[in-house]
């Protein structure tokens, strides 16, 4: 039986915090560094001031780009570490389960052997025990009808019985020693499992923090990229009056961006309405298909399909075209959304009650949910891709119980959403 210790492997991110070096200074720290359009206009009054302002704007632009790239690299590295430590925990869990089963079998054998030896000892005790041979001799000398030949036969039988008793005791002791050794190995594996689980929990907390930092940094760069570029173009333009035109362009593009954002929000609302209309596709158990398609790889052992791929498949692969919507298999909270080593762009949803679902190989830019977001069954959370260790467009889907993968094919079938 899976220990409840593993149940925290998904939900811990809400409580655990791992200190990371700051990747992006606060917005307040940058606010004073950004030039204003009034400063750009003033700088164009003299060549020296213009050149100084050009250098300033160029340096700011490069700094933002460098920080954004650094944050993305940090998030990718954190995702790689998360996948590595989580895999180590999964392997440790499998080893513990195997050793624990062996220990239980050895203990059962030891109990059986001990009981057999105990029953025989009790029988010997009731019949005279180690003094039985002497009792036979005295019985013969006391006028028993037992003759010498019959007495020798009885003594021979007693010798064999004693040998059998000694053998049973020896087997029982050996079984006890084997059970004790197996139990010790299982305990050691359990301790290692707990240690690796703690490492996996810390890695997830770090990956969550790095992913959020990368998103903030990218947003900061994006929000200032256009304006800084326009300022730089205005400064390099030798006509002073063009500054107002550049500034107007920034305003127009900002208005267009707001319009696009509004349109995107409306599209998202429409998609949510479609998802709500598709609620009938969610089984009574609350589970839904993450994607429709042909199963190309099931759960369990397999030949490694690519360099770096595992020979034990921890989920199920469902073939689908690029950008096919990936839906949440059950309602829950997004525990992680970002890079995850060989899984590529990855989403992990905490579905409650010790259950979680995982979605791998999403296309670049295809994840449409964020960490901490609440999602419903059937809601679009990502789009099919082939990132990470992948040989073609497909969804790698996992179901985890108490933090450990189980067969998703049988689980989904049992819950009315057969893949």
Image: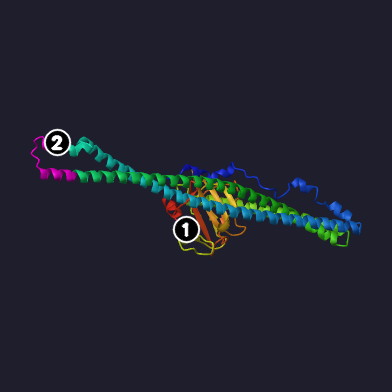
Q: Which residue is mark 1?
A: 312
Indicate the position of residue 397 as horizontal and vertical percent values.
50, 55
Is residue 147 magenta-colored?
yes
Q: Which residue is mark 2?
A: 138
Classified by dominant secondary structure, the portion drawn in magenta counts as helix
Indicate the position of residue 377 as horizontal and vertical percent values.
51, 49
Indicate the position of residue 364 as horizontal and vertical percent values.
61, 59
**Residue 161 falls in which quadrant of the image?**
top left
For the residue pair 93 and 388, the one nearer the viewer reads as: 93
Using the numbered discs, state the Cα–Cα distance from disc 2 to disc 1 in whole angstroms.
71 Å
Is residue 240 placed above or below 196 in the rendered structure? below
Q: Is residue 270 visible?
A: no
User: At x 69% / y 55%, what residue is drawn?
Assistant: 70
**Residue 138 falls in which quadrant of the image?**
top left
Highlighted range, magenta: 139-157
Tags 2 and 1 touching, CB below 8 Å? no
User: At x 56% / y 54%, what residue is drawn?
Assistant: 84
Colour basis: rainbow
Q: Nearer the viewer, mark 2 or mark 1?
A: 2
């Amino acid at each position: 039986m899976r220990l409840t210790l593993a149940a925290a492997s998904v939900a811990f991110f809400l409580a655990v915090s791992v200190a990371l070096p700051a990747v992006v200074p606060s917005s307040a720290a940058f606010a004073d560094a950004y030039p204003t359009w009034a400063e750009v206009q003033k700088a164009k009054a003299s060549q020296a001031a213009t050149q100084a302002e050009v250098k300033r704007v160029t340096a700011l632009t490069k700094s933002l780009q460098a920080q954004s790239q650094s944050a993305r690299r940090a998030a990718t590295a954190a995702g790689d570490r998360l996948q590595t430590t989580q895999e180590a925990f999964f392997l440790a869990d499998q080893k513990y389960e195997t050793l624990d089963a062996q220990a239980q079998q050895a203990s059962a054998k030891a109990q059986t052997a001990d009981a057999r030896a105990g029953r025989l000892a009790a029988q010997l005790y009731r019949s005279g025990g180690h003094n039985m041979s002497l009792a036979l001799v005295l019985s013969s000398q006391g006028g028993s009808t037992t003759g010498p030949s019959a007495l020798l036969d009885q003594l021979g039988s007693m010798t064999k019985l004693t040998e059998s008793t000694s053998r049973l005791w020896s087997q029982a002791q050996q079984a006890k020693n084997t059970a004790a050794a197996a139990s010790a190995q299982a305990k050691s594996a359990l301790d290692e499992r707990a240690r690796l689980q703690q490492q996996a929990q810390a890695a997830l907390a770090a990956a969550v923090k790095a992913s959020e930092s990368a998103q903030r940094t990218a947003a900061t760069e994006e929000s200032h990229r256009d304006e800084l570029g326009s300022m730089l173009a205005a400064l390099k333009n030798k006509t002073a009056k063009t500054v107002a035109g550049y500034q107007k362009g920034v305003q127009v593009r900002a208005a267009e961006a707001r319009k696009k954002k509004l349109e995107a929000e409306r599209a998202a609302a429409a998609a949510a309405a479609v998802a709500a209309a598709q609620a009938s596709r969610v089984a009574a158990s609350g589970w839904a298909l993450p994607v429709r398609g042909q199963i190309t790889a099931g759960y369990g052992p397999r030949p490694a399909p690519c360099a770096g791929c595992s020979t034990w498949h921890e989920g199920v692969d469902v073939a689908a075209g690029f950008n096919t919507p990936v839906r949440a298999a059950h309602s829950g909270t997004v525990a992680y959304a970002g890079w995850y080593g060989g899984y590529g762009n990855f989403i992990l949803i905490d579905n409650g009650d010790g259950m979680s679902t995982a979605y791998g190989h999403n296309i670049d830019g295809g994840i449409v949910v964020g960490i901490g977001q609440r999602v419903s069954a059937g809601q679009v959370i990502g789009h099919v891709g082939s990132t990470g260790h992948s040989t073609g467009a497909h969804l790698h889907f996992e179901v985890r119980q108490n933090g450990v993968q189980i067969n998703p094919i049988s689980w989904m079938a049992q819950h009315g959403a057969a893949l």
